[in-house]
Amino acid sequence: QVQLVESGGGLVQAGGSLRLSCAASGRTFITYCMGWFRQAPGKEREFVATITWSDGRTAYADSVKGRFTISKNNAENTVFLQMSSLKPEDTAVYYCAARRLPGLDYGVKGYDYWGQGTQVTVSS
């Protein structure tokens, strides 16, 4: 199994920045890529960004391109999400996820392991 623990959420004003971290433990070698998703109240969980462990390929949702950056530290089995120019509509619980199968995936069902989530609130 793989355990994921997110940290770094909080309250920030619009235009500000936050950096989320996701620490992976357990059988991390079975995972191909990591992803960040978010879920706002009353909405479905949505894809934010993903990155492969091996070569660092990334993909982003259109709504965060140019503002968010996903990165990784293989030695520490940690993935980061640097969020800048935050908007009130970025307010959500942010989840870290891990995928076992090869290939980038933008859907919730494509990921096998999930963290508990961290709240990000952007005030206007």
Image (cartoon, rainbow, N blue to C red):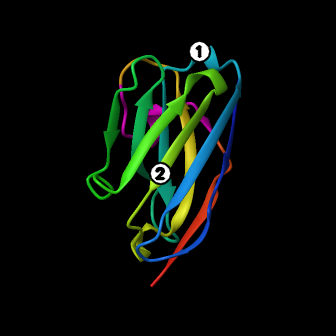
User: Disc 2 residue type?
Assistant: Gln
Above or below for 8 versus 28: below
Q: Which residues are magenta?
A: 104-114
Residue at 36% from the left image edge and 39% from the top image edge? 106
Residue 45 x %, y %: 47, 55
Q: Give SS at disc 2.
A: strand
User: Disc 1 residue type?
Assistant: Ile
Identify the image quadrant of the N terminus. top right
Q: Residues within 10 Å of mark 1 (few under 14, many from 20)?
A: few
Residue 50 x %, y %: 41, 37
Identify the image quadrant of the C terminus. bottom left
- Which mark identifies residue 30? 1
Which of the 4 image quarters holds residue 119?
Answer: bottom right
Does residue 112 belong to the magenta stretch? yes
Residue at 62% from the left image edge and 60% from the top image edge? 9
Q: CA distance from mark 2 to mark 1?
A: 25 Å
Could you say which is closer to the camera, residue 48 or residue 87? 87
Q: Give SS at disc 1.
A: helix
2 to the left or right of 69: right
Could you say which is closer to the camera, residue 30 or residue 14? 14
- Which mark identifies residue 52? none
Upstream in sequence: badge 2 or badge 1: 1
Above or below for 75 versus 61: above
Q: Which one is closest to the eye, mark 2 or mark 1?
A: 2
Could you say which is closer to the camera, residue 120 or residue 114? 120
- Say which residue label 2 marks: 82
Residue 3 x %, y %: 71, 32
